[in-house]
């Protein structure tokens, strides 16, 4: 029984405290209420679909997502035809063919997201030496997770008068050192949502954050369902064992 209690406590506590790999000093983050937080949290598929639109139209020019395949979008509500249409917008270098040559082909649903650059060096040259990180696991690789990303995208401000900003850098209250190479990517109505949701800056940032949480942990809902089933099983088996114990030892004083 004590073991069961300990397991329940560990699972419950883990839903409130996220363990992330810190990529720098911690900043004071404004906590947000996310639908996927908590033991019974679930993804908001509409928000993730809008976030994917934001990624394609705003972020994909510099940042890749190399661990997610186009067919994975079916898990957040995209149809097979929609996924095929999305994948066909990109080309992939494939091969060699029968003649030993590489060739370009249209991406298929089974392919991973096509990145904006062929390699890291090309990415750095295109961004004045700064490397735009892959976003697949960005919410897991930063202390604060979704809250960090939300605050970072909202953290662009005018620099203090006594602070000299380096060339090609922008002031951000959340980024370590307060200088970031990425210009402010999101403003009001930078996208026009297909579902006609008002495209305010806050809404856009929330949606793209939700999308990137999903890319980092697409199995989150399955894991939580499995956890609930395990807890139910442990409770039932514990009650059965207690009943057996009492029956076996009922005649022993």
Image (tube, rainbow, N blue to C red):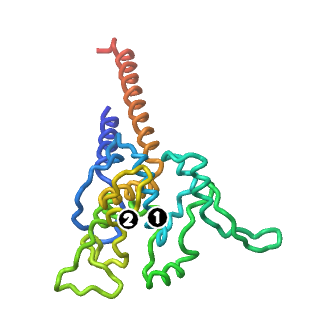
Residue marked by disc 2: 190
Q: Which residue is depicted at the point 35% across and 40% down?
A: 40
Q: Secondary structure at mark 2?
A: loop
Evaluate whether residue 83 shows in this view.
Answer: yes
Q: Quadrant of the N terminus?
A: top left
**How many residues crowd mark 1 within 10 Å: few (<14), some (14–19), many (20+)?**
few
**How many residues crowd mark 2 within 10 Å: few (<14), some (14–19), many (20+)?**
some
Cα–Cα span, label 2 and label 1:
9 Å
The quadrant where residue 231 appears: top left
Q: Quadrant of the C terminus?
A: top left
Residue 93 located left or right of residue 223: right
Asked whether the residues under the numbered discs 2 and 1 touch, taking CB atoms below 8 Å apart as contact, a structural biologist would say yes
The numbered disc on residue 111 is none
Q: Which residue is depicted at the point 24% across and 67% down?
A: 27
Q: Nearer the viewer, residue 203 or 10?
A: 203
Evaluate whether residue 19 shows in this view.
Answer: no
Work out whether mark 2 precedes mark 1 in sequence or the reverse, and give the earlier one.
1
Tag nearer the camera, 2 or 1? 2
Residue marked by disc 1: 57
Residue 81 picture location, percent across and down = 60, 48
Residue 12 picture location, percent across and down = 31, 42
Q: Nearer the viewer, residue 102 or 249?
A: 102
Residue 6 picture location, percent across and down = 31, 40
The quadrant where residue 9 appears: top left
How many marks are shown on the rendered structure? 2
Q: Is residue 144 above or below residue 237?
A: below
């Amino acid at each position: 029984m004590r073991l069961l209690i300990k397991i329940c406590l560990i699972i419950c506590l883990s839903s409130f405290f996220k363990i992330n790999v810190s990529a720098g000093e911690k900043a004071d983050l404004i906590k947000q209420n996310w639908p996927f937080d908590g033991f019974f949290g679930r993804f908001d598929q509409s928000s993730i679909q809008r976030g994917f639109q934001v990624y394609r139209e705003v972020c994909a020019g510099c940042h890749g997502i190399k661990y997610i395949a186009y067919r994975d979008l079916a898990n957040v509500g995209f149809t097979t035809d929609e996924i095929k249409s999305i994948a066909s917008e990109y080309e992939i270098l494939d091969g060699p063919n029968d003649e030993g040559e590489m060739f370009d082909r249209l991406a298929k649903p089974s392919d991973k997201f096509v990145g904006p650059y062929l390699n890291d060096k090309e990415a750095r040259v295109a961004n004045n030496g700064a490397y735009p990180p892959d976003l697949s696991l960005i919410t897991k690789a930063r202390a604060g997770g979704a809250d960090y990303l939300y605050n970072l995208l909202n953290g662009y401000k005018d620099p203090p008068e006594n602070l000299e900003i380096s060339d090609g850098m922008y002031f951000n209250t959340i980024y370590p050192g307060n200088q970031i190479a990425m210009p402010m990517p999101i403003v009001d109505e930078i996208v026009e949502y297909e579902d006609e949701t008002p495209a305010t800056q806050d809404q856009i940032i929330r949606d793209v954050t939700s999308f990137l949480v999903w890319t980092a942990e697409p199995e989150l809902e399955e894991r939580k369902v499995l956890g609930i089933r395990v807890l139910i099983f442990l409770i039932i088996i514990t009650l059965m064992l207690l009943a057996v114990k009492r029956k076996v030892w009922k005649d022993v004083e």
